[in-house]
Image (cartoon, rainbow, N blue to C red):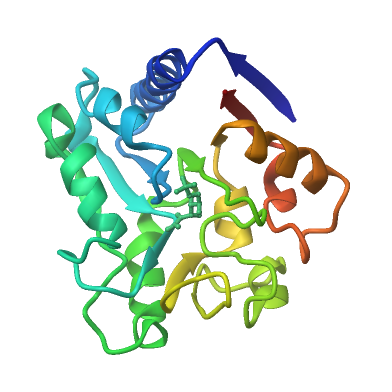
Amino acid sequence: MNFVEYPDRDMLALSLADRLASQLAQHLRSNEQGSLCVPGGTSPVQVFDTLSGSDIDWDRVTVFLGDERWVDGDHKRSNSRLLRRHLLKDRAAAAQYIDLYTGDPRPEDATEALAEALKPHLPITAVLLGMGNDMHTASLFPGADHLAEALSPGAPPVMAVRAEGAAEPRITLTRPVLSNAIHIHLLIMGPEKREALERAQKMDPIEAPIRAFLDEATVHWAE
Ligand SMILES: O=C(O)[C@H](O)[C@@H](O)[C@H](O)[C@H](O)COP(=O)(O)O
């Protein structure tokens, strides 16, 4: 694990957005298409605002979330809503977006079609992960139903999730598809998350799902 500590959150956002943009741009130099997978939640807003103005060939980039809450796109808990407001604007408005929320009644109804839609965009060029204080990432929550399957090497790329720590049913990308990304970044802020990360390093992914990605990840932290 590579741990980068920033003097403040502004520096973190600028530098991480720059890093993601450079990795995408470099990939697009030798590939027709690239993909960017991002988290929802609250932490990445500033990174998104900065990244959306990056001067890269966004029309050759496909963006999707690592997980989504099963709510309408205009619901205040929708991660897609967050993305439309903060990332898929300015220059990044030219990116192709795969919405994980399909409008099906249950996330289970959408997993196969989403796996097909994502397939041409794998491996992911760059994935940005978030983490909760309970050490979940994407919607891989400790204690979630089917967590062992979602963490296994043979997991389908997309799974439905129900968990106590999640307010609503979710859909999530699973360990193999996330951990196969060419570049893996984790964004965390504040002392509580730093402590949770330190705990996670000594735990098993079934109790601390973020652990599954730490060996390959660059962690970006600011107070
Ligand atoms: O939809 C979600 O909730 C996420 O994608 C989730 O994995 C998130 O990244 C963490 O819960 C951190 O969330 P915060 O940034 O809000 O702390």
Residue 102: % across, % down: 24, 75
**Considering depth in this image, is 20 or 219 the residue closer to the camera?**
219
Q: Is 87 positioned to the left or the right of 201 in the image?
A: left
**Considering depth in this image, is 134 or 4 the residue closer to the camera?**
134
Q: Measured along the vertical axis of the image, is residue 133 above or below residue 18?
A: below
| Residue under the point 33% across and 29% down | 46
Q: Measured along the vertical axis of the image, is residue 22 above or below residue 79?
A: above
Residue 104: % across, % down: 25, 85
Q: Quadrant of the C terminus?
A: top right
Q: Is 60 positioned to the left or the right of 38 in the image?
A: left
Residue 219: % across, % down: 63, 30
Q: Is residue 215 visible?
A: no
Residue 89: % across, % down: 13, 36
| Residue under the point 38% across and 41% down | 36
> How many numbered tags mark residues here?
0
Q: Quadrant of the N terminus?
A: top right
Which residue is most to the right?
A: 202
Q: Is residue 10 visible?
A: yes
